[in-house]
Image (spheres, coloured by chain):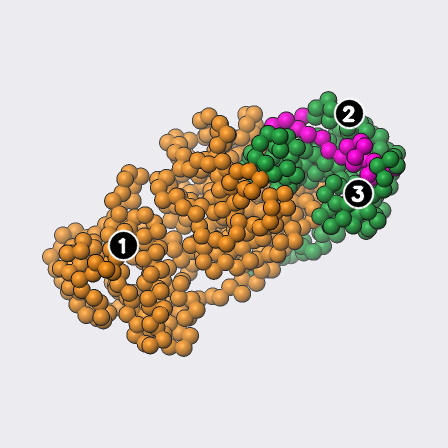
Amino acid sequence: MMKRLLICLVALMLAGPVFAQNGPLRLTITDGVIEPITFAAPSFQAETPEAIQVASEMSRLVVQDLAGTGLFREVPASAFISQISSFAQPVAFADWRAINAQALVVGAVNVQGDSMTVKFRVYDVFSGQELGTGLQFAGTATGWRRMGHKVADAVYGRITGEGGYFDSRVVFVAESGPKDNRQKRLAIMDFDGANVQFLTDSSTIVLAPRFSPSGDRVLYTSFESGFPRINVLNVANVGRQQLQTAAGEMAFSPRFSRDGRQVIYSLSNGGNTDIYRTDLSTGQHVRLTSAPSIETAPSLSPDGSQIVFESDRSGAQQIYIMSANGGEARRISSGDGRYGSPVWSPRGDLVAFTKQNAGRFHIGVMRIDGSEERLLTSSFLDEGPTWSPNGRVIMFTRETQGAGGTSSVYSVDISGRNLKAVPLQGGASDPSWGPLQP
Amino acid sequence: MTLFKKAAIVLLVLATAACTNPDRFGAGSGAGGGAGSGFGADGGLAGSASDPTSPAFFNQTIGDRVLFAVDTSTLTPAGKVILDGQAQWLLANTDYRSVIEGHADEQGTREYNLALGFRRANAVREYLVSRGVPTGRLEVTSFGKERPIEVCSEETCYAQNRRAVTVLSFSALTS
């Protein structure tokens, strides 16, 4: 099943050359226009003959991860003046300054049988300093992509001062078949669309999977019984269990609490839909809303104290915040149109949402008091945002118009830049972005 | 892992929930009244539409579905006429029960459309109950926007997709 990759971190004890300090290279991510940092990443050194191919592929993956953020721009190898022929050799900074590479990533890969190590260093070319210290990751040869993502996360972290998101996975719904007979299966992928694995077959409709905070389990809605019910799926062994629901009740739109012990979700009974919380260890249910309107799509704040959700109590879908124990709610959305599927950001300061207005759908973000609404996308149908682990990127579903309409998973920066489809075979919807892997 | 095991105690095993409802996506086995088959338009039709006791009569002559305006669950006058016919038929043919399926068009978010589908299905259920159909013979579910019958992205299709369908099954075959 899911191969668990053992990663160990080893700081390389090695003194780098010392140059005059001009202030370290640092990219501060803001909402304004960002001039990308230029970087060079020569093909990683192969320390064993078995490592030749993977060293080259891994350095390409690091480049792809970094350049894919839109925050970094690669200086192509064709521009290089000096070559890196050994991980240990002193860096000829002047040669990299001359081609205007602000950062330099050098690495070396060692493969022996199924065990692999990669070590790397990141240099601030213009100050001639190493950024941080060299690191080494160890794992299996088949897990080389994860090791590459870890290198890219480290480079991203050293230059931006923020956590990365490359060594993470996304659970989603893989779609096939025509619009009036769509087949849906739960699937999991790396954040970049690689390594797709299916978690269910297509015998029943499955919707809106949600990762647990640690990434070990997935909540999703299944129509296996003919009625929407919530299942808990263990990612490692794909074992499934159903959240207990009384006859005549339909449960959907689940999310884990931050400690993974509770589920908040919607329950419909007698045509009315409200928000409930169930403790997974005791099975105890608590009803959190009781209005006759539709209350759904709950999402907890990072500290677990509040819930953002949508309700049509005003006559149309709007976004509200209430205490995690229920009670009075305050409306935060105030613009034209309808607002749904709110998701609290990992940093706690923003809510991502779906907005429907004048025949178009948008993914947007607003502050938790409803101010500074910013629409990031616009299309025939965009919906269902999910946050990257570092809160810088949002993935969502985009569906195209008409009889041949299909769904794809897209990502966009919270600045609205860098909109792109996650490359996947076939249709895909309802992404839920998991945590950085251990 | 420990937590997951504890959770298992209070969770129902998935498989146990699957058997009490008609397999409405079964391919056309309804013609012979096969066990567990529904008689909705998505499955096979049973009997002749000219036989007033047949599911085919219910589905075609009376009409198995009612339509809704955008973002509403209010029954229209035309819908009530159809539901009056459904109620009469259900009262006369007591071997049948039904699952009322609510649906929405694609112009909405997934969760909201599920909840909206429930509202529509429940509006039909309450109307049928008001006409004397026992509540125990009527279940409701919602497919939200997951099962459109028309696929264009225009109002002509949306109008057909905003529906509640009364899907018949044999009482004897369900618990």
Q: Which kind of residue does numbered mark 2 sit on? A: Val
Q: Quadrant of residue A290?
A: top right
Please tell me whether residue B68 belongs to the stretch shown in magenta.
yes
- x, y (%) of residue B115? 62, 36
Which residues, given as a range, are shown in magenta? B53-74
Residue A222 can be seen in this image: no
Q: Nearer the viewer, residue A150 or A68?
A: A68
Tell me the distance, in whole angstroms, between the alpha carbons under discs 3 and 1: 63 Å
Disc 3 and disc 1 on one polypeptide chain:
no
* Chain where mark 2 sits: B
Q: Residue at x 77, y 29 (%)?
A: B83
Q: Quadrant of residue B8?
A: bottom right
* Chain where mark 1 sits: A
Tell me the distance, in whole angstroms, between the alpha carbons under discs 2 and 1: 68 Å
* Chain where mark 3 sits: B
Q: Which chain is green?
A: B
Please give the label number shown on residue A74.
1
Q: Circle 3 — which element?
A: loop
Q: Which kind of residue does numbered mark 3 sit on? A: Leu
Q: Residue at x 71, y 52 (%)?
A: B18
Q: Residue at x 49, y 43 (%)?
A: A397
Residue B25 can be seen in this image: yes
- Residue at mark 2: B81
- x, y (%) of residue A259? 49, 51
Q: Residue at x 49, y 27 (%)?
A: A358
